[in-house]
DNA sequence: GAAAAATATGCACACTTTTGCATAGTGGGC
DNA sequence: GCCCACTATGCAAAAGTGTGCATATTTTTC
């Protein structure tokens, strides 16, 4: 059920349309909760039916009209209530690590390429988040309360990402030795 | 669809029953792919219908009989094929971090408690995995290929866990200052 | 001038995951 | 003797997620 709350969270500061949300999700709460546009549109309708969001159609020139959603008082209350409730332990699902359990000379090359691809993706992410942190969250002690929380989430993402990059390097090294071994034996 | 492959992976070395899988999942592949027992039983039946697993009933004394599953040649082939296919980027969903975006003096105490609980859970995990690594994966260079992969997955889990513990400490410190501020203002 | 990409929203179906319940025997503690 | 925990398996329904497709306009690129 946390998609609803992730959307509400994204709408605390700004009113956004489904399309804007789907895009901006990546560069805000989306680091910690991602969703496709289909999911977002559906959820937005549910939330406005519940009265947690209000909507207004904005006519645009040169672009299709958009439906902009804003959080209501009831929405804010529901969100606050959710925060105070119990938190589910994280899912922890990673195909790549399961695949590594099946490492063999046959697939070492493929897995190394996958690790490499992940590494690059994570590099971009960490870079982006680092930039946001430096610009807007440089001195956590002086931030207003709510933004201290955002700082912590951002920091978690960055640290996790940096750790992952270091791990990738170790993995690529070891995978290279497996590949080399196979090449020698052929 | 990766639950199927996670199960197959867990059954590479040992034949296990659904109950054993559900339990042992935590201390093997389950660090990277968890599932409830209902899911596991269902998936086991599907996999044995497909011919990827074979099953045999084992009569026990003092306990209900169990159905033990083993991976077939077809299962191994399907698994190998899956490993060579494209890998989905990780889900990245964490309620706790979304909740942090909503930090306020009201919920700082609650969130600190949640972080603390996660910290303790992660401590146990890291400890367990560290123990396994030291005992069975101390010298990665000398391991057979497949176990090198397990070593890498294990290392990813441990590092990620240790990083998380460090983050928890930082988070708890900052959350404590928020709580202290609130106490002063009352 | 045509094709592609971006803006903007949505339906329908399939698959996955979660939740709640059901059954049934054994062993241990009080 | 009763209750609880553990072993062991499973069904059914609901909720959540993902995939593919559909539509319509405008701006940008070749």
Image (cartoon, coloured by chain):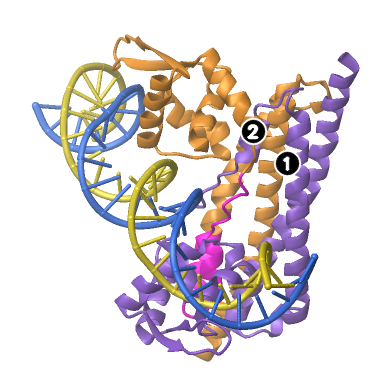
Chain colours: A purple, B orange, C yellow, D blue
B99 inside magenta stretch: yes
- Disc 1, SS: helix
Q: Give the camera-side residue of C14 and D29.
A: D29
Q: Which residues are magenta?
A: B88-115
- Disc 2, SS: helix
Q: Give the camera-side residue of C10 and B71.
A: C10
Q: Of marks 1 and 2, which one's residue comes earlier in the chain?
A: 2
Which mark's residue is nearer the viewer, 1 or 2?
A: 1
At which x and y percent is residue D15? Answer: 33, 57
User: Mark 1–mark 2 contact, CB under 8 Å?
Assistant: yes
Q: Is residue B1 left or right of residue A125?
A: left
A40 inside magenta stretch: no
At which x and y percent is residue B40? Answer: 41, 32
Q: Is residue A88 visible in the rendered structure shown here?
A: no
Q: Residues within 10 Å of mark 1 (few under 14, many from 20)?
A: many
Read off the residue under disc 2.
A99
Real-space CA distance between mark 1 and mark 2, rounded to the nearest whole angstrom: 10 Å
Q: Residues within 10 Å of mark 2 (few under 14, many from 20)?
A: many
């Amino acid at each position: 059920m946390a998609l609803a709350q992730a959307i509400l969270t994204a709408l605390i500061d700004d009113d956004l349309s489904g399309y804007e949300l789907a895009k901006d999700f990546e560069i805000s709460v989306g680091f910690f909760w991602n969703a496709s546009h289909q999911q977002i549109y559906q959820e937005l309708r549910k939330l406005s039916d519940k009265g947690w969001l209000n909507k207004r159609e904005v006519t645009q020139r040169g672009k299709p009209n958009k439906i902009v959603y804003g959080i209501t008082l009831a929405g804010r209350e529901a969100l606050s209530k959710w925060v105070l409730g119990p938190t589910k332990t994280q899912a922890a699902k990673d195909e790549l690590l399961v695949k590594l359990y099946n490492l063999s000379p046959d697939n070492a090359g493929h897995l190394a390429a996958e690790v490499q691809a992940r590494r690059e993706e994570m590099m971009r992410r960490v870079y982006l988040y680092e930039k946001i942190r430096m610009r807007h969250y440089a001195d956590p002690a002086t931030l207003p309360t709510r933004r201290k929380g955002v700082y912590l989430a951002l920091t978690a993402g960055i640290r996790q990402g940096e750790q992952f990059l270091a791990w990738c390097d170790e993995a690529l090294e070891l995978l290279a030795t497996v590949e080399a071994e196979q090449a020698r034996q052929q």
